[in-house]
Amino acid sequence: MNSPYIYQYNKLFNSISDAFFMDRLIWQPELPLRQAGDFKIFLDRVFAQEMLCAQLPTMSREAMNKMGNEELKRLREVGTNPFMFYGDTCFVNQISLNVGKGLTLYTEGHDVLRQTNEPVIYETHNVERDYQIQGIVHLFNFWIQHTPDILNGFKP
């Protein structure tokens, strides 16, 4: 799973003084990324469990989706509310570029709850074009980058 596309927490959150996952691989895409067709993203299971344990008020989930809507506009996608949270937690179990067209990245709930050291696997559905791959990866990273803000009850 080594690649130049590895995203490390300390690089994503270098401006946050109270970073709580220093120097740990948080996620990476399945490599090589195909030019067309569905792909996977691997998420650190410890990070996933921490997000599952973090309660998130409705207002914070709505604020994150409001920011996600702005990102969708910037990406020129027509979808809304790209982030589907697992219950009232900070864990995102589905990201949609356009849910009407089924352009999604998702993980099965039972996979997240398994007790194992293996990463949580997200899979895509109907993500076939390069711009769709870039959009899904961007939104996934957007969620990871904004996790400290989400947990601190930010307002957009």
Image (cartoon, grey):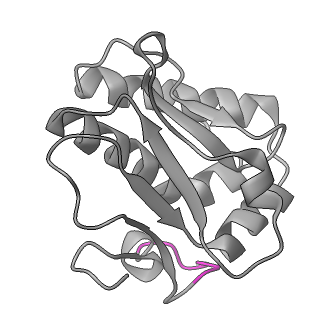
Q: Nearer the viewer, residue 152 or 87?
A: 87
Residue at the extreme front of the image, as rendered: 37
Q: Main secondary structure of the magenta part?
A: loop
Residue 156 in view in this figure: no
> Where 92 sits versus 43, above or below?
above
- Image quadrant where residue 154 sits: top right
Please tell me in which quadrant of the rendered image residue 155 appears.
top right
Q: Is residue 99 placed above or below 27 in the rendered structure?
A: above
The image quadrant where one finds the N terminus is: bottom left
Q: Position of residue 107 (x, y in %)?
A: 62, 47
Residue 105, horizontal then vertical, whole percent: 48, 39
User: In the rendering, at what x and y percent does residue 87 appear?
Assistant: 83, 37
Q: Which residue is drawn at the image coordinates 58% and 78% (left, top)?
A: 19
- Residue range (magenta): 15-21
Left or right of 74: which side holds 156? right
Query: Is 18 in the magenta?
Result: yes
Rendered residue at 27%/40% (across/down): 37
100 shown above or below 40: above
User: Which sits in the foreground, 154 or 32?
Assistant: 32
The answer to if 61 sits in the magenta stretch is no
Residue 95 showing in the rendered view:
yes
Q: How many numbered marks appear?
A: 0
- Please name whichever residue, 49 or 90, is drawn nearer the observer in this view of the structure: 49
- Which residue is located at x 42 percent, y 72 percent? 15
